[in-house]
Protein backbone atom coordinates (compact mmCIF):
# COMPACT_ATOMS: atom_id res chain seq x y z
CA UNK A 1 0.00 0.00 0.00
CA UNK A 2 0.93 3.62 -0.39
CA UNK A 3 1.05 6.21 2.37
CA UNK A 4 -1.17 5.38 5.31
CA UNK A 5 -1.86 8.97 6.32
CA UNK A 6 -3.81 11.34 4.09
CA UNK A 7 -2.35 14.56 2.72
CA UNK A 8 -3.52 17.95 3.94
CA UNK A 9 -4.11 20.40 1.05
CA UNK A 10 -4.73 24.06 1.81
CA UNK A 11 -6.36 26.21 -0.89
CA UNK A 12 -6.10 29.92 -0.33
CA UNK A 13 -7.20 32.76 -2.52
CA UNK A 14 -9.54 35.67 -2.52
CA UNK A 15 -13.19 35.32 -1.80
CA UNK A 16 -14.83 35.00 -5.22
CA UNK A 17 -11.77 33.62 -6.97
CA UNK A 18 -13.49 30.28 -7.54
CA UNK A 19 -11.74 27.97 -5.07
CA UNK A 20 -14.93 26.03 -4.50
CA UNK A 21 -15.76 25.85 -8.19
CA UNK A 22 -12.31 24.49 -9.01
CA UNK A 23 -12.52 21.95 -6.19
CA UNK A 24 -16.02 20.79 -7.16
CA UNK A 25 -14.99 20.23 -10.75
CA UNK A 26 -11.69 18.55 -9.82
CA UNK A 27 -12.66 16.22 -7.01
CA UNK A 28 -14.82 13.64 -8.84
CA UNK A 29 -11.70 12.42 -10.66
CA UNK A 30 -9.49 12.40 -7.60
CA UNK A 31 -10.89 9.47 -5.65
CA UNK A 32 -11.45 9.69 -1.95
CA UNK A 33 -11.00 13.28 -0.81
CA UNK A 34 -12.46 14.89 2.27
CA UNK A 35 -13.55 18.53 2.11
CA UNK A 36 -13.31 20.23 5.47
CA UNK A 37 -16.53 22.08 6.28
CA UNK A 38 -15.59 25.27 8.11
CA UNK A 39 -17.36 26.95 10.97
CA UNK A 40 -18.40 30.56 10.48
CA UNK A 41 -20.39 33.27 12.22
CA UNK A 42 -21.32 34.98 8.97
CA UNK A 43 -24.98 34.91 7.94
CA UNK A 44 -26.04 32.08 5.71
CA UNK A 45 -26.40 32.95 2.03
CA UNK A 46 -29.36 31.79 0.04
CA UNK A 47 -28.91 28.16 -0.93
CA UNK A 48 -26.28 27.43 1.71
CA UNK A 49 -26.95 24.43 3.91
CA UNK A 50 -25.78 24.15 7.51
CA UNK A 51 -23.22 21.35 7.78
CA UNK A 52 -22.64 21.24 4.02
CA UNK A 53 -21.33 24.66 3.02
CA UNK A 54 -20.47 25.76 6.53
CA UNK A 55 -21.31 24.99 10.11
CA UNK A 56 -23.14 28.20 10.94
CA UNK A 57 -22.27 29.12 14.53
CA UNK A 58 -23.33 32.06 16.63
CA UNK A 59 -20.47 34.04 18.17
CA UNK A 60 -20.80 32.32 21.57
CA UNK A 61 -20.57 28.86 19.99
CA UNK A 62 -17.58 29.92 17.93
CA UNK A 63 -15.84 31.33 21.01
CA UNK A 64 -16.54 28.13 22.91
CA UNK A 65 -14.96 26.09 20.10
CA UNK A 66 -11.93 28.37 20.32
CA UNK A 67 -11.70 28.03 24.09
CA UNK A 68 -11.91 24.26 23.79
CA UNK A 69 -9.08 24.31 21.24
CA UNK A 70 -11.39 22.57 18.77
CA UNK A 71 -10.25 24.63 15.77
CA UNK A 72 -7.15 23.85 13.74
CA UNK A 73 -7.02 27.51 12.70
CA UNK A 74 -9.29 30.49 12.73
CA UNK A 75 -9.45 34.04 11.44
CA UNK A 76 -11.58 37.11 11.34
CA UNK A 77 -12.57 37.97 7.80
CA UNK A 78 -14.51 41.10 6.85
CA UNK A 79 -16.32 41.22 10.16
CA UNK A 80 -17.00 37.52 10.75
CA UNK A 81 -15.15 34.56 12.27
CA UNK A 82 -14.15 31.52 10.25
CA UNK A 83 -12.41 28.39 11.48
CA UNK A 84 -11.57 24.79 10.69
CA UNK A 85 -12.92 22.16 13.12
CA UNK A 86 -9.84 20.06 13.88
CA UNK A 87 -11.43 16.74 14.79
CA UNK A 88 -12.96 16.00 11.37
CA UNK A 89 -9.71 16.87 9.62
CA UNK A 90 -7.67 14.59 11.84
CA UNK A 91 -10.16 11.75 11.58
CA UNK A 92 -9.98 11.87 7.78
CA UNK A 93 -6.18 12.14 7.66
CA UNK A 94 -5.79 9.23 10.05
CA UNK A 95 -8.15 7.17 7.91
CA UNK A 96 -5.80 7.80 4.99
CA UNK A 97 -8.04 10.30 3.22
CA UNK A 98 -6.66 13.43 1.66
CA UNK A 99 -8.21 16.59 3.06
CA UNK A 100 -8.87 19.93 1.37
CA UNK A 101 -9.22 23.18 3.31
CA UNK A 102 -10.46 26.33 1.59
CA UNK A 103 -9.37 29.14 3.84
CA UNK A 104 -8.04 32.68 3.80
CA UNK A 105 -4.42 33.70 4.32
CA UNK A 106 -4.18 34.13 8.12
CA UNK A 107 -5.66 30.68 8.65
CA UNK A 108 -3.43 29.15 5.98
CA UNK A 109 -0.37 30.49 7.80
CA UNK A 110 -1.56 28.96 11.07
CA UNK A 111 -2.02 25.59 9.40
CA UNK A 112 1.47 25.73 7.91
CA UNK A 113 2.89 26.51 11.39
CA UNK A 114 1.12 23.54 12.94
CA UNK A 115 1.33 21.07 10.06
CA UNK A 116 4.60 21.52 8.26
CA UNK A 117 3.77 18.87 5.71
CA UNK A 118 0.59 20.63 4.50
CA UNK A 119 0.61 21.33 0.77
CA UNK A 120 -0.16 24.98 0.16
CA UNK A 121 -1.94 26.12 -3.02
CA UNK A 122 -2.72 29.69 -3.91
CA UNK A 123 -5.57 30.34 -6.34
CA UNK A 124 -5.30 33.76 -7.95
CA UNK A 125 -7.72 35.66 -10.16
CA UNK A 126 -6.41 36.69 -13.58
CA UNK A 127 -6.80 40.29 -12.41
CA UNK A 128 -8.39 42.28 -9.62
CA UNK A 129 -10.84 43.76 -12.13
CA UNK A 130 -12.01 40.25 -12.97
CA UNK A 131 -12.29 39.39 -9.29
CA UNK A 132 -14.41 42.47 -8.73
CA UNK A 133 -16.63 41.45 -11.62
CA UNK A 134 -17.07 37.97 -10.11
CA UNK A 135 -17.82 39.33 -6.63
CA UNK A 136 -20.44 41.67 -8.03
CA UNK A 137 -21.89 38.93 -10.21
CA UNK A 138 -22.42 36.78 -7.13
CA UNK A 139 -24.74 39.47 -5.80
CA UNK A 140 -24.36 38.36 -2.19
CA UNK A 141 -22.42 41.23 -0.63
CA UNK A 142 -23.02 44.90 0.04
CA UNK A 143 -20.79 47.41 -1.74
CA UNK A 144 -18.84 47.99 1.49
CA UNK A 145 -18.18 44.25 1.90
CA UNK A 146 -17.13 43.95 -1.74
CA UNK A 147 -14.58 46.71 -1.18
CA UNK A 148 -13.26 45.01 1.96
CA UNK A 149 -13.04 41.66 0.18
CA UNK A 150 -11.12 43.30 -2.68
CA UNK A 151 -8.74 44.90 -0.20
CA UNK A 152 -8.13 41.50 1.44
CA UNK A 153 -7.52 40.06 -2.03
CA UNK A 154 -4.79 42.66 -2.64
CA UNK A 155 -3.12 41.78 0.66
CA UNK A 156 -3.35 38.04 0.03
CA UNK A 157 -1.82 38.37 -3.44
CA UNK A 158 1.34 39.76 -1.87
CA UNK A 159 1.80 36.45 -0.04
CA UNK A 160 1.88 34.24 -3.12
CA UNK A 161 5.50 33.26 -2.57
CA UNK A 162 4.68 31.63 0.76
CA UNK A 163 2.82 28.92 -1.15
CA UNK A 164 4.01 25.73 -2.84
CA UNK A 165 1.80 26.16 -5.90
CA UNK A 166 0.16 29.04 -7.72
CA UNK A 167 -2.84 28.44 -9.96
CA UNK A 168 -4.39 31.33 -11.87
CA UNK A 169 -8.09 30.71 -12.30
CA UNK A 170 -8.58 32.30 -15.69
CA UNK A 171 -10.13 29.50 -17.71
CA UNK A 172 -11.84 27.16 -15.25
CA UNK A 173 -10.90 24.00 -17.21
CA UNK A 174 -7.22 24.90 -17.04
CA UNK A 175 -7.36 25.63 -13.34
CA UNK A 176 -9.08 22.29 -12.71
CA UNK A 177 -6.42 20.37 -14.64
CA UNK A 178 -3.68 22.22 -12.76
CA UNK A 179 -5.30 21.51 -9.40
CA UNK A 180 -5.66 17.82 -10.24
CA UNK A 181 -2.03 17.72 -11.38
CA UNK A 182 -0.86 19.07 -8.02
CA UNK A 183 -2.86 16.53 -6.06
CA UNK A 184 -1.76 13.63 -8.22
CA UNK A 185 1.91 14.63 -8.13
CA UNK A 186 1.86 15.09 -4.35
CA UNK A 187 0.41 11.61 -3.94
CA UNK A 188 3.31 10.19 -5.93
CA UNK A 189 6.09 11.64 -3.80
CA UNK A 190 8.46 8.77 -3.04
CA UNK A 191 8.71 9.55 0.65
CA UNK A 192 4.98 9.13 1.12
CA UNK A 193 5.06 5.43 0.25
CA UNK A 194 5.08 3.10 3.21
CA UNK A 195 8.16 1.07 4.07
CA UNK A 196 6.18 -2.12 3.47
CA UNK A 197 5.29 -1.01 -0.05
CA UNK A 198 8.88 -0.16 -0.92
CA UNK A 199 10.16 -3.43 0.54
CA UNK A 200 7.63 -5.42 -1.46
CA UNK A 201 8.65 -3.56 -4.57
CA UNK A 202 12.31 -4.27 -3.92
CA UNK A 203 11.59 -7.96 -3.37
CA UNK A 204 9.64 -8.15 -6.61
CA UNK A 205 12.45 -6.69 -8.71
P1 LIG B 1 -17.10 33.46 2.24
O1 LIG B 1 -17.76 34.36 3.24
O2 LIG B 1 -16.98 34.11 0.89
O3 LIG B 1 -17.72 32.09 2.21
O4 LIG B 1 -15.61 33.26 2.75
C1 LIG B 1 -14.78 34.34 3.01
C2 LIG B 1 -13.34 33.90 3.10
O5 LIG B 1 -13.17 33.08 4.26
C3 LIG B 1 -12.88 33.07 1.91
O6 LIG B 1 -11.58 33.48 1.55
C4 LIG B 1 -12.86 31.68 2.48
O7 LIG B 1 -11.92 30.85 1.83
C5 LIG B 1 -12.45 31.94 3.88
N1 LIG B 1 -12.74 30.83 4.79
C6 LIG B 1 -13.75 29.92 4.69
N2 LIG B 1 -13.66 29.05 5.68
C7 LIG B 1 -12.58 29.38 6.42
C8 LIG B 1 -11.96 28.81 7.58
O8 LIG B 1 -12.35 27.80 8.14
N3 LIG B 1 -10.86 29.44 8.04
C9 LIG B 1 -10.35 30.55 7.45
N4 LIG B 1 -9.24 31.06 7.98
N5 LIG B 1 -10.89 31.10 6.35
C10 LIG B 1 -12.00 30.52 5.85
Image (cartoon, rainbow, N blue to C red):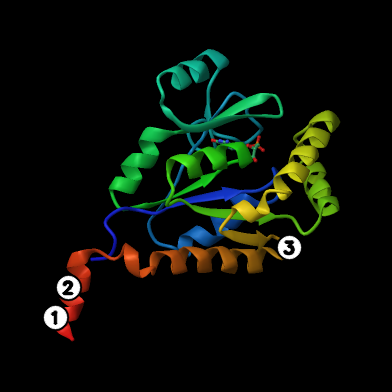
Q: Is residue 162 left or right of residue 194?
A: right
| Marks 1 and 2 close (CB-CB < 8 Å) | yes
> Which residue ends up furthest to the bottom in the rendered image?
205
Q: Is residue 96 visible?
A: yes
Q: Position of residue 20 (x, y in %)?
A: 60, 49
- Secondary element under disc 2, as helix, strand or loop, is helix
Seen in the picture, residue 189 relative to 16 is either above or below; the reply is: below
**Is the residue marked by circle 1 packed among few (<14), some (14-19), or many (20+) residues within 10 Å?**
few
Residue 21 visible at all: no
Circle 3 packing at 10 Å, graded few (<14), some (14-19), many (20+), is some
Residue at the image position 64 percent from the left and 61 percent from the top: 167
Between 191 and 68, the one lying in front of the other is: 191
Q: Please give left or right for residue 15 compared with residue 57 in the image.
A: right
> Which quadrant of the picture is home to ligand 1?
top right
Reading the image, the residue beneath label 1 is: 203
Q: Position of residue 63 (x, y in %)?
A: 51, 17
CA gap between label 3 and label 1 equals 47 Å
Amino acid sequence: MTASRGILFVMTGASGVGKGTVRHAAVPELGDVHYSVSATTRPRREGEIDGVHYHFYDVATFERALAEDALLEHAEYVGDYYGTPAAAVDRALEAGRDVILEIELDGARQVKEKREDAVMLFIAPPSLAELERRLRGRGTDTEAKIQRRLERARVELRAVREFDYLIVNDRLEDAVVAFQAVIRAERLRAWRYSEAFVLALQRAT
